[in-house]
Image (cartoon, rainbow, N blue to C red):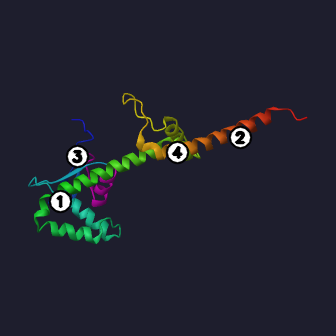
């Protein structure tokens, strides 16, 4: 049977408490399991004799070890709230809330990585060029509604239109200055 990305890595715990990686046929430590997880792999840890799933117990142990080494991720108030959640009605909501929070965190990280990978963002002055393009397009549209709405100017855009008009004038002035400078370059001195 071929292993897939969704198939968790099966770790068996022997009676001696040693952990056995069934894929590589060797013994592993908590640090090894932590490494597998950091690489994006899911793990499942089961007791060889009873078949009990021990994954939660070992994941909590990895978290406790990391926290005790000074690699604190969980603030005291969050830990306190987690302890409290075991004694309140919130216990039923906490798992769903935490799962949704971490999903949003993963999505945010993915979007950030994607935006960093865009080659245009590395170009010096890219943000200024983007802002000028947006201002130019906004000015060119001049508060007109989208097609099919009668083509009437949007009254709410009146204040913005005056600002946009002055930005357009500034852009026109810069363009004229650049054209004048270019035309001077092309003329022979003399």
**Mark sitting on residue 162:** 4
Query: Which quadrant holds residue 64?
Result: bottom left
Q: Nearer the viewer, residue 176 or 161?
A: 161
**Mark sitting on residue 187:** none
Foreground mark, 4 or 3, reads: 4
- x and y percent of residue 143 in the render? 45, 38
Q: Mark 1 — residue?
A: 94
Foreground mark, 4 or 1, reads: 4
Q: Residues within 10 Å of mark 1 (few under 14, many from 20)?
A: some
Q: Nearer the viewer, residue 5 or 93?
A: 93
- x and y percent of residue 116 in the render? 46, 46
Between the C-alphas of marks 1 and 3, the distance is: 24 Å
- x and y percent of residue 21 in the render? 24, 50
Q: Give the mark nearer the N terminus: 2 vs 1.
A: 1
Q: Give the mark nearer the N terminus: 4 vs 3.
A: 3
Q: Mark 3 — residue?
A: 8
**Mark sitting on residue 177:** 2
Q: Along the horizontal axis of the image, is 187 left or right of 144?
A: right
CB atoms at circles 1 and 3 under 8 Å apart? no
**Which quadrant of the rendered structure holds the N terminus?**
top left
Q: Residue furthest toward the left?
A: 50
Q: Along the horizontal axis of the image, is 14 left or right of 152?
A: left
């Amino acid at each position: 049977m071929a292993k897939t990305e969704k198939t968790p890595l099966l770790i068996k715990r022997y009676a001696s408490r040693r952990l056995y990686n069934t894929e590589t046929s060797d013994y592993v430590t908590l640090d090894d399991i932590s490494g597998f997880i950091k690489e994006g792999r899911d793990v499942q840890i089961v007791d060889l004799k009873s078949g009990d799933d021990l994954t939660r117990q070992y994941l909590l142990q990895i978290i406790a070890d990391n926290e005790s080494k000074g690699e604190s991720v969980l603030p005291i108030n969050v830990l306190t709230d987690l302890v409290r959640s075991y004694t309140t009605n919130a216990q039923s909501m906490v798992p769903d809330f935490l799962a949704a929070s971490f999903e949003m965190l993963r999505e945010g990280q993915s979007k950030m990585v994607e935006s960093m990978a865009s080659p245009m963002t590395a170009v010096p002055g890219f943000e200024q060029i983007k802002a000028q393009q947006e201002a130019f397009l906004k000015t060119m549209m001049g508060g007109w509604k989208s097609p099919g709405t009668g083509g009437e100017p949007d009254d709410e855009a009146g204040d913005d239109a005056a600002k946009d008009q002055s930005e357009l004038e500034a852009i026109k002035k810069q363009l004229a200055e650049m054209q004048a400078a270019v035309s001077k370059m092309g003329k022979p001195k003399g």
